[in-house]
Amino acid sequence: MGTSYTHSRLQAPRFFPKPPNPQLPSSSPPHNLSLRSIFCSHSSFQASTKPSPIPTTNNYNHLIQSLCKQGNLRQALKLLRHEPHPSQRTYEFLILACTRQNSNFYAPFIDRRLAVDGLYRDSFLSTKLIDMYSHFNSLDEARNVFSKTSDKTIFVWNSLLKSLVMAEEGDEALSLLREMGRNAIHGHVIRHGFESRVHVATTLVDSYAKIGKVKYAQKVFDKMPHKNVVSWSAMIACFAKNGRHFDALAIFREMMMTRNPEVAPNSVTMVSVLQACAALAALSQGKLVHGYVLRRGLDTTVSMSNALIALYIKCGSLDFGRRVFDTMIIPKNVVSWNSMIAGYGVHGLGKEAILAFGEMIRVGISPSPVTFVSVLGACSHGALIEEGMRLFNSMEKEHSLKPQSEHYACMVDLLGRAGRLDEAAKIIEKMEMEPGPTVWGSLLGACRIHGNTELAEKACSHLFELEPWNAGNYILLADIYAEAKLWEEVNRVKKLLDQRGLQTLQGCSWIEVKKKLYSFVSVDELNPQIEQARGFLTHLVKEAKEMGYVPSTKVVLCNLEQEEKEKIVLGHSEKLALAFGLINGGQGEVLRITKNLRLCEDCHSLTKFVSKITNREIVVRDVNRFHRFRNGLCSCMDYW
């Protein structure tokens, strides 16, 4: 390992293009502007015909709007100088054009002209202005517009609230919401009832969800005096989209307990609930939700069908997922096909994934970039090297899709997993774009599988700069050093972790037993079931050793005695979940375990022996794929 993880980078240019002249060029009087000169981007054009007649005010408004549609904002602003009475629609077009073209430079000009015309009284335009400034991350200007707006409708408040949330000014947003609740829109609430406040608060919950501020979203939700179905759905979606799947199901149960027909779950609610069930591999609960969807007749949208497909695939029931797919009455979209292709891939059925891809093309559905991520990933898990390379090359030639960083990451994974690390490195060298974290991360993962310290150091030199906060990269490098018995380097990486204050992600596994979910973490001292699970594990390990099981302790990043290392790996969360399932599950039931990290070699090895000893089918879903253990064998064929 070298003493530094830096690498040469392109120097930033010493100059930048000059911004447009802040003074809009003075244009000739209106009667010298011809239609051709307004619509033509070449200022050197001289009309050969006689000057056009003087346009009317309505013509100016119309022409300004047409120029904005064409993206000719500069020319539109020239013409605005000659329009004494711009309409609301004209200003709307100007603001939208400014936003779409990222023309931050022209925003103050439009703002000033609005003020001159006295249009800050127009709450509609004020809302558009606040949205524009939010797009430019100009929060002070957005606040200024809000303060000058005399008629602060609920939409003006809503716009500033969203701006504050997107700028991660959570405390200010909550303060503003409280102020609004006290007095700001009292009259509006009296006229329109609670729905107006519910709408604002729900929008705020949704906005916080989009930027991962779950705590703030929950505060807003908890303080809502009146909640409708949209509010409940937004909070469930917030939890589901931000990895708080247990909380999503808990609040769904709370919603159902209200027994209020006005907040009965709709299809949007149930899609989020299904996503939470899928993420937890909670098959029994997912089936209950599916039954509710059918009874309520909520299965009439393609998004619902897609959510059901994803549920069964992510719970390890690929056949059920395919059955939902095949019986869809609504026309399948690209997401439906992507779900099936990805499903085959994570179950290690690469050839079936390629067949589904071909079937999709035959029925006339054009593949998306996500489709290729799914099918290339399937090739990687199935060791289908040549097929993967053919599909990658077909992206641009046959489907007019330019490969992006994630597609190169798939190819690096495809070759690297197969041990062709030099070819994987060459793909990175030939990339037309700067390789991102997913590309270097794929190379690092392949180096861990095959123990290549040199390439691992090269990958980490980039990863430590691209995502210095990601502790997983440090752990992977330390794993590689530990396997090579380079303990000094292991200690150096661990020290680097401490210096940067990075927290490693704790291993967590969960299992569904008798329709209830139970979670376990490594070295779990608080769980009352632990002692019983450990005792049973010790018995299983003893029996497995008699059949040839040898514990693999290379993941232990400490130079300890073998016996101590074996005790550490015995406490891995997936082993605890496995033992708990065997003790408490029904006789002959398939055990389904989900792990938030990659399954380690020792857990993989022991689970094969346990499936033979207990004559049970055990399905484990780790962060990459499914492992289906039967009679001492795994569906991945030890290729993962």
Image: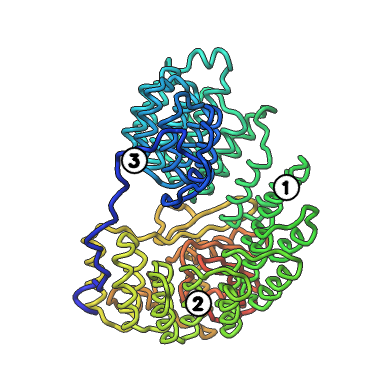
Q: Residue furthest left?
A: 3
Q: Callout 1, which amino acid?
A: Thr
Q: Who comes first in sequence, dot 1 or dot 2? A: 1
On the image, numbered disc 1 is attached to which residue? 301
Label 3, label 2: how many angstroms apart (C-alpha)? Answer: 52 Å
Q: Callout 3, which amino acid?
A: Pro
Q: Who comes first in sequence, dot 3 or dot 2? A: 3
At which x and y percent is residue 151? 45, 18
- Residue in front for this viewpoint, 46 or 401: 46
Q: Who comes first in sequence, dot 3 or dot 1? A: 3
Q: What quarter of the picture does the N terminus occupy?
A: bottom left
On the image, numbered disc 2 is attached to which residue? 411
Contact check, label 3 and label 2, Cβ < 8 Å: no
At which x and y percent is residue 408? 48, 73
At which x and y percent is residue 350? 63, 76
At which x and y percent is residue 574? 50, 65
Q: Is residue 397 placed above or below 620 in the rendered structure?
A: below
Q: Is residue 639 placed above or below 251 in the rendered structure?
A: below
Q: Is residue 142 placed above or below 22 in the rendered structure?
A: above
- Residue in front for this viewpoint, 565 or 331: 331
Q: Is residue 237 visible?
A: yes
Q: Which mark is residue 25?
A: 3
- Report crowding for label 2: few under 14, some 14 to 19, many 20 or more residues within 10 A (C-alpha): many
Residue 279 placement, left or right of 172? right
Residue 148 placement, left or right of 297? left
- Residue at position x 41%, y 70% from top? 433
Label 3, label 1: how many angstroms apart (C-alpha)? Answer: 53 Å
Q: Is residue 637 visible?
A: no
